[in-house]
């Protein structure tokens, strides 16, 4: 089809590509470029609340680039700590999701086809319910008078309720809970496609189940693991709602910092600078994700 | 069931006019050349087969005819009209795909009517023509079914109907039998040829199965690595291959490498280290004395006997080292003193005329007539 | 045959399912709690559902979310299908990497980044042209931007799986490329389109962050109202709302799944019959 269009309808082909391209460019690329531009501007009281980058004054073009925000970013403790903290929380969340999610994905993939369908549906269902509501549900679990504490006290493991709500522990719980389906899904998709005859061959050659798993299944599911982890890690770094509802004053996450700058301080240039820095931070994992996606795409054809 | 007489009758009819011309067609994909300067002429109403193993370029050539690929250079003339600039939806060409490609979301009727609807034909006409062609392929009572409700053979017939209903100038068949079970292939081959003859259409088919090509085609072309090796009727290509490749690709053969040691207008002698005696071939060749050649002798031309034959040439002594009983014939593998193994295809009828059928380890003589050897360039 | 360790399989899956569902079930459970202190049980009651019906702010917001969701879903399916088809069938055209990047990025980029960048775009546009004001339109665009990526990926995946022969056969029979797309390709990927629609609708109705950045006066969505309330802590009305939501989603998912299963089974049976005939 592509070759045909190239040969017989080149103009048509360009038009077909151009329309979605234009939409994406205007509403994705352009905003980014703006963010970069504004991060170099200065805070102003007014509308818009920032100075212009390029001004035509008295017949001369002025370029006012203020790198002050970036310097501030690097110097002020808050930003650096928030970044590091966000990455740490996201990384740990990813790891825990992997440790819990892999066995689940694995055992669903190995179930018989009819059960598989029901099980995957059961895993997907929470995904379809709102993140907000699920995080809210977590509040009910982790509160001092919540389900978890009540249960633990009733069993007698603890006497006093554990302080989880409004602490970073609560955030971890909330993050893992919400992001788990995101890891299971791509991982399952890979595991279920795996050629079982490879495992059979391994058993036939004398490998014990655990060894076969480590040497055959694990490496073959590598792509699924990577896709799942990236799908959790990258958005987790900038997560806002979960730390906001479950975290405490000592929970530092960059999403919150950005929100603060924008809504509370009304310092848009600062918020832009934080955004740019965050994008830079995520550029490598994002490029990796893009690479994995394109591989998938090529692999299918 | 098809009458074999009918088919061979058509093959012996005078050939139709030149209808399709493929002129110097080249197709490159990046650095690799899939079709390498192919020239072919196809006659009206004939069934022409492109025969070759996978990767030889036959499917690419077919797709170029359909318009699904564009040639890097060259011309395609159908009935005098150059098609190169025409996209597939404007060409008077229709194709029956290897996987049939019946639209899953449409009924058999709708599938067949699809092409006519694109032409903008009036509704009554479409209905009539669809009914007629479904009748032709004997699928009329399945008109309302969906493709997944049909067996492989039934799907094939619908696919054929769909590609015929527009009365194309050229019909293309892409490995028509490959998706069918071996058992029903033969019957389907003859049925297909029958239908095509009724409809009076010019047809080019692509296959890797030489038996299929031999059975169905009026003429065929043997292809390898993007080039045409030989063109001719099945008889011509089989009996008079023009190269080692053709000889070995169609059927099987015994190949002897040697040199021409005597060259007369009406016969030549070939000396080969593989045989003790010289080979005598009852026609002349062009080329210098001493020229290296390959001589092809088909297994069915090789006689086997316990006594030495009464000739001075075209025979050898050996030991039966293997044989395969195939029912109506037996294939004997005879190992000669030189180590060469000659294959003889002996019909069961012949074996009954012998005193005793050759057994494993027997010393036997293999021989062939002067006209059996085909001389090929080395 | 590969044998799995059945007891291990059972325990892993049970624990996994419990982990995923206990919070949700507790949510539903406590919605029937008489007490205002959600997690301290004081008796069975449905009064919080009644409270919901009297909650004007919430109902108003629900309407807005519903409308927005519908508009978003339709727009996302159109643009996303278009983009997904281009990605799948047009090979590596000039700018492919950028195009694919723009599609893949919103899948993973934190929403705060998307929110800020879009706000800045709209504010700049407002500055230059006096339009658009932040409100339904800007939220709609933002939601569509989020959802287009998901639809594009789903469609791209499905189109790649689709046998090219169908499209080629249609071309061979005389249909122009445009006709082929609408008459052959679209019907054959219809399931992907429906999934994309449902996904877009859900994402739009659930969205918090992007909506917060892009909404204006009179366009407060349901999640925003809910968010501001649950920030303060537990709220039994929210449990009731959540239960309704969960019920609708569960029924939807189960029904959709059952329909798909039934269609698949019927198809298999028909193929079997054909094979034997």
Image (cartoon, coloured by chain):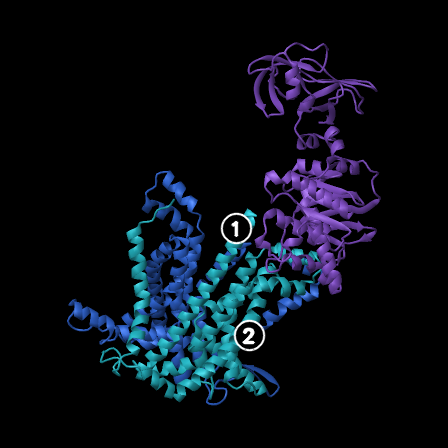
Residue drawn where x is 75% and y is 22% of the image: B291
Tag 1 secondary structure: helix
Q: Nearer the viewer, residue A90 or C12?
A: C12
Q: Nearer the viewer, residue B336 or A250?
A: B336
Looking at the image, residue C28 sits to the left or right of residue B339; the answer is left
Please state the chain letter of the residue tagged with numbered disc 2 in the rendered image: C
Could one spot residue A249 in this view of the protein?
no
Please state the chain letter of the residue tagged with numbered disc 1 in the rendered image: C
Q: Are marks 1 and 2 on the same chain?
A: yes
Q: Which residue is mark 1?
A: C272
Could one spot residue A127 in this view of the protein?
yes
Residue at the bottom extreme? A46
Q: Which chain is cyan?
A: C
Total labels: the figure holds 2
Q: Which chain is blue?
A: A
- What x and y, as percent, mark residue B343? 63, 22
Q: Which chain is purple?
A: B
Q: Which residue is mark 2?
A: C75
Can you say which quadrant of the picture contains the N terminus of chain B? top right
């Amino acid at each position: 089809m592509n070759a045909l269009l190239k040969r017989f309808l080149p103009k048509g082909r360009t038009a077909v590509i151009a329309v979605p391209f234009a939409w994406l460019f205007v509403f994705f690329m352009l905003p980014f470029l703006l963010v970069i531009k504004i991060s170099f501007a200065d805070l102003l009281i007014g509308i818009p609340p920032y100075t212009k980058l390029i001004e035509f004054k008295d017949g001369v073009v002025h370029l006012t680039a203020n790198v002050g925000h970036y310097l501030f970013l690097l110097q002020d403790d808050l930003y650096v700590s928030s970044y590091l903290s966000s990455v740490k929380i996201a990384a740990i969340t990813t790891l825990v999701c992997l440790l819990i999610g892999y066995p689940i994905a694995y055992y669903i993939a190995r179930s018989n086809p009819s059960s598989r369908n029901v099980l995957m549906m059961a895993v997907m269902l929470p995904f379809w319910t709102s993140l907000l509501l699920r995080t809210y549900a977590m509040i009910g679990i982790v509160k001092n008078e919540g389900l978890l504490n009540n249960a633990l006290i009733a069993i007698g493991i603890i006497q006093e309720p554990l302080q989880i709500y409004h602490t970073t522990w609560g955030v971890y719980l909330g993050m893992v809970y919400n992001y788990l389906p995101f890891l299971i899904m791509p991982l399952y998709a890979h595991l279920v496609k795996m050629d079982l005859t490879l495992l059979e061959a391994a058993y036939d050659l004398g490998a014990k189940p655990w060894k076969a798993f480590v040497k055959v299944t694990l490496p073959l599911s590598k792509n699924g693991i990577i896709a799942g982890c990236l799908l959790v890690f990258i958005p987790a770094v900038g997560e806002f709602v979960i730390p906001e509802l479950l975290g405490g004053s000592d929970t530092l996450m960059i999403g919150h910092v950005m929100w603060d700058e924008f809504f509370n301080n009304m310092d848009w240039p600062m918020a832009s600078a934080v955004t740019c820095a965050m994008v830079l931070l995520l550029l490598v994992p994002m490029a990796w994700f893009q690479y994995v996606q394109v591989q998938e795409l090529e692999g299918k054809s | 069931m098809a009458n074999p007489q009918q088919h061979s009758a058509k093959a012996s009819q005078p050939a139709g006019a030149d209808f399709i011309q493929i002129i110097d067609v080249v197709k490159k994909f990046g650095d690799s050349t899939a079709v390498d300067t192919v020239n072919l002429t196809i006659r009206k109403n004939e069934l022409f087969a492109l025969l070759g193993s996978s990767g030889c370029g036959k499917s690419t050539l077919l797709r170029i005819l359909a318009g699904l690929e564009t040639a890097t250079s060259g011309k395609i003339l159908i009935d005098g009209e150059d098609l190169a600039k025409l996209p597939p939806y404007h060409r008077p060409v229709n194709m029956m795909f290897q996987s049939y490609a019946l639209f899953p979301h449409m009924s058999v009727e709708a599938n067949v009517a699809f092409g006519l609807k694109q032409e903008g034909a009036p509704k009554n006409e479409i209905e009539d023509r669809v009914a007629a062609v479904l009748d032709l392929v004997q699928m009329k009572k399945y008109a309302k079914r969906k493709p997944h409700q049909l067996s492989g053979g039934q799907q094939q017939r619908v696919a054929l109907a769909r590609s015929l209903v527009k009365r194309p100038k050229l019909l293309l068949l892409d490995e028509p039998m490959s998706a069918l079970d071996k058992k029903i292939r033969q019957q389907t081959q003859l049925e297909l040829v029958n239908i095509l003859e009724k409809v009076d259409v010019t047809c080019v088919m692509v296959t890797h199965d030489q038996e299929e090509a031999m059975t169905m085609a009026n003429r065929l072309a043997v292809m390898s690595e993007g080039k045409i090796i030989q063109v001719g009727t099945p008889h011509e290509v089989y009996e008079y291959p023009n190269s080692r490749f053709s000889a070995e690709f169609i059927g099987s053969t015994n190949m002897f490498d040697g040199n021409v040691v005597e060259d007369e207008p009406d016969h030549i002698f070939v000396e080969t280290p593989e045989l003790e005696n010289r080979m005598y071939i009852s026609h002349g060749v062009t080329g210098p004395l001493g020229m290296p050649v390959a001589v092809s002798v088909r297994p069915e031309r090789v006689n086997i006997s316990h006594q030495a034959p009464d000739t001075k040439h075209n025979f050898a002594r050996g030991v039966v080292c293997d044989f395969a009983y195939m029912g109506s014939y037996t294939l004997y593998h005879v190992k000669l003193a030189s180590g060469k193994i000659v294959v003889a295809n002996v019909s069961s009828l012949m074996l009954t005329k012998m005193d005793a059928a050759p057994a494993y380890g027997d010393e036997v003589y293999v021989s062939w007539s002067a006209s059996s050897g085909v001389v090929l360039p080395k | 045959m590969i044998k799995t360790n059945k007891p291990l399989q059972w325990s892993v899956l049970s624990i996994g399912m419990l982990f995923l569902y206990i919070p949700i079930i507790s949510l539903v459970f406590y919605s029937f709690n008489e007490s205002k202190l959600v997690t301290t049980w004081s008796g069975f009651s449905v009064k919080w559902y009644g409270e919901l019906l009297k909650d004007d702010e919430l109902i108003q917001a629900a309407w807005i979310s519903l409308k927005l969701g519908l508009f978003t879903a339709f727009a996302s399916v159109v643009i996303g299908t278009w983009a997904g088809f281009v990605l799948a069938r047009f090979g590596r055209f000039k700018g492919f990497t950028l195009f694919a990047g723009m599609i893949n990025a919103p899948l993973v980029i934190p929403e705060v980044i998307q929110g800020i960048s879009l706000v800045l775009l709209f504010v700049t546009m407002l500055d230059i042209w006096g339009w658009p004001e932040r409100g339904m339109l800007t939220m709609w665009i933002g939601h569509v931007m989020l959802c287009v990526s998901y639809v594009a990926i789903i469609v791209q995946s499905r189109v790649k799986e689709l046998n090219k022969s169908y499209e080629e056969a249609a071309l061979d029979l005389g249909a122009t490329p445009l006709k082929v797309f609408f008459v052959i390709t679209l019907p054959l990927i219809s399931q992907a389109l429906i999934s994309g629609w449902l996904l877009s609708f859900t994402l739009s109705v659930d969205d918090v962050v992007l909506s917060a950045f892009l909404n204006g006066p009179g366009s407060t969505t349901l999640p925003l109202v809910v968010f501001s309330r649950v920030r303060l802590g537990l709220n039994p009305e929210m449990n009731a709302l959540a239960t309704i939501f969960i019920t609708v989603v569960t029924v939807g998912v189960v029904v959709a799944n059952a329909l798909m299963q039934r269609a698949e089974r019927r198809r298999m049976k028909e193929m079997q019959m054909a094979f034997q005939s």
